[in-house]
Image (cartoon, grey):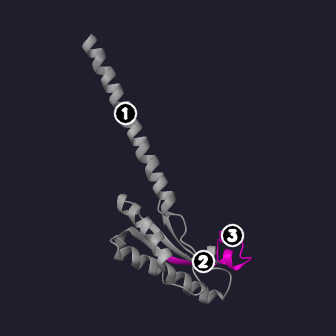
Amino acid sequence: MAQEEQGKLAAKANSQEEAKQKAQEADALDAAKRLIEIPIDNYFLSQTDADSYQKYRLDEKIVLLKLYPDLRFYIYGYTCDEGNEEVSEYIGLRRAEKAKNYLISKGIDGKRIVNVSSKHDTNPVVPNTDEENRRKNRRVQLVIVQ
């Protein structure tokens, strides 16, 4: 009986350790998703190519995307409230497409990218009250598919 009891206790301990490890992995995945979804901002008004700052921010996301190769995502390009809707739509789309091309050039499989689109000046992260805020709204964002 003692051996049977020890076997049950060992199995329970292994099960608890496995559950703990799975919970830690889930927490790490959730944290990675949150980091991947942080917007990449600071674009100038008509800028579509990523500068060194935006590439650095994309590179941070690439590291995480390579750690979690099963993650699929959307890429959205945003603008501020300046300019007409047609131009804003175009610039937002070009920002997203350029980000997609950069990710692919760095080894991210294009099949993981569900869609690329412009959200132009919708969903500002801050009010478009001054240039500093407008630069925060001019952004690219990766959104993980749930």
Does the residue at mark 3 contact the one at mark 1 (Cβ under 8 Å)? Answer: no
Which amino acid type is shown beneath numbered disc 1? Glu
Q: Is residue 128 left or right of residue 48?
A: right
User: Sequence-wise, which precedes: disc 3 or disc 1?
Assistant: 1
Residue 138's disc is 2
* Residue 72 lies in quadrant: bottom left
Residue span colored magenta: 116-134
Which amino acid type is shown beneath numbered disc 2? Arg
Q: Position of residue 9 (x, y in %)?
A: 33, 21
Does the residue at mark 2 contact the one at mark 1 (Cβ under 8 Å)? Answer: no
Q: Is residue 26 above or below residue 141?
A: above
Q: Secondary structure at mark 2?
A: loop
Q: Is residue 32 left or right of residue 68?
A: right
Which residue is rendered at x = 57% and y = 73% of the image?
A: 41
Q: Is residue 69 visible?
A: no
Q: Secondary structure at mark 3?
A: loop
Q: Position of residue 102 (x, y in %)?
A: 40, 77
Which residue is rendered at x = 39% and y = 42% of the image?
A: 22
Q: Position of residue 75 (x, y in %)?
A: 48, 72
Which residue is rendered at x = 49% and y = 80% of the image?
A: 51
Q: Is residue 15 above or below residue 101?
A: above
Q: Secondary structure at mark 1?
A: helix
* Residue 70 lies in quadrant: bottom left
Farthest residue, direction top: 1
Q: Position of residue 145 (x, y in %)?
A: 47, 62
Q: Is residue 1 above or below residue 107?
A: above
Does the residue at mark 2 contact the one at mark 3 (Cβ under 8 Å)? Answer: no
Which is more toward the observer, 133 or 90? 133
Which amino acid type is shown beneath numbered disc 3? Val
Residue 17's disc is 1
Residue 126's disc is 3
What is the distance, in whole Å, between disc 2 and disc 3 at their CAs?
11 Å
